[in-house]
Image (cartoon, rainbow, N blue to C red):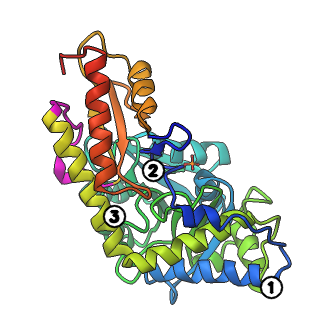
Amino acid sequence: MSSAAPILLTPGPLTTSARTRQAMLVDWGSWDERFNQLTASVCSQLLAILNGAATHHCVPLQGSGTFAVEAAIGTLVPRNGKVLVLINGAYGKRLAQICEVLGRDFSTFETAEDEPCSAADVDRLLHADPAITHVALIHCETSTGLLNPLPQIAQVVKEHGKRLIVDAMSSFGALPIDAREVPFDALIAASGKCLEGVPGMGFVFAEKHALGAAQGNCHSLALDLFEQHEYMARTGQWRFTPPTHVVAALHEALLQYHEDGGLPARQRRYANNCQVLLDGMAELGLRSFLPAAIQAPIIVTFHAPTDPRYQFKAFYERVKAKGFILYPGKLTEVDTFRVGCIGHVDAAEMRAAVAAIAQALHAMQVLDI
Ligand SMILES: *Cc1c(COP(=O)(O)O)cnc(C)c1O
């Protein structure tokens, strides 16, 4: 295994194909008509993945995923709005932190890190507080791999006449979301996750009427999605310097996405990666943190071995030396580590990763799993 090119089993940046990386070897000018066509093509392909062309705009934004989440909340929640933030992990907490920093009124509802939020909870909370205008939800909570029941929650939010903002960063492209059946004002994802592009841009699917009514809401010049969309619709160009190489890589990654069979194929490959990983780790005696019913095939959290000879840092370095990058745990109460199932990897890489993990634990003389 070459130490120069380790396999990233992390939820972004992740392993990309050589073809996707190759697409970055061109320097595009931001006025180049062909580059603007690339952007337009990326946006319409993204909209098609969730059947959103009739109802939503795709607004791309420079930066990592959090920039796009912050832009969505800042643009779509009016300054006198109130957000109900549903939390069962670190990314949910980040939503609340964004509301706090932006000065948007909010309340939180927190369930345990292994407990999805339920539609019944949301129904009760919306009945109890009519001041709430928006609900914010993480689809796949990447800090554990937990999947929240998006369609059911979206339905309840709609029945109450409220608006939904969904962070689907780590699920979009791999888990089906149909904008014709799941009502939302904004759904946010990014280039460098399940689409297997490189990191550097987010995008927000914004409901057309909601975006049209959002002029002047935003606290920020650069993160204003109304202005970003308006400028792009008028000129075909990005409002500020575009992440040209990132757009080119995402365009190439989307070509491969479709050639491979689109969402169903991506979902199958990740589900298989996840199962191969779970089976292999179970054979080593390593237990996953979440029950199968709420485990998304995106990233798996494992309980750390209890043996005192186990230490994440040393374990990480040993596995890295064999060519695989793991991810530390993100839970406060339990010692865990995480292994991603997404990226340009398949069952062979997952089996090799399990073998590397077994060898590392053996070399560390970690017997007590
Ligand atoms: C990756 C991710 C983000 C964005 O994180 P960045 O570090 O800003 O790219 C946001 N939400 C979820 C659920 C994620 O998985």
Q: Earlier in the sequence, mark 2 or mark 1?
A: 1
User: Which residue is at the front of the view, 287 or 78?
Assistant: 287
As helix, strand or loop, the secondary structure at mark 1 comes to helix
Q: Does residue 32 lie above or below 71 as drawn?
A: below
Query: Which corner quadrant of the image does residue 129 belong to?
Result: bottom left
Q: Which residue is mark 1?
A: 33
Q: Which residue is mark 2?
A: 85
- Amino acid type at mark 2: Val
Q: Can you give x and y, in whole percent of width and height, for residue 172 in the image?
A: 43, 65
Instruction: Name the N-terminal-most of marks 1 and 3.
Output: 1
Please name which of the two marks, 1 or 3, marks the residue nearer to the observer. 1
Q: Residue at x 56, y 67 (%)?
A: 19
Which residues fall within the magenta stretch?
Answer: 284-297
Residue 313 horizontal side relative to residue 289, left or right:
right
Q: Would you say the residues marked 3 and 2 are in contact, meaning their CB atoms lie under 8 Å apart?
A: no
Q: Is residue 62 above or below residue 359?
A: below
Q: Secondary structure at mark 2?
A: strand
| Residue at image mark 3 | 150
Percent x, y of residue 14: 50, 51
Residue 286 on the magenta span: yes
Visible residue check, residue 116: yes
User: Relative to 159, is 7 on the left or the right?
Assistant: right
C-alpha separation, residue under disc 3 versus residue under disc 2: 14 Å
Foreground: 264 or 323? Answer: 323
Looking at the picture, does residue 57 appear above or below residue 312?
below
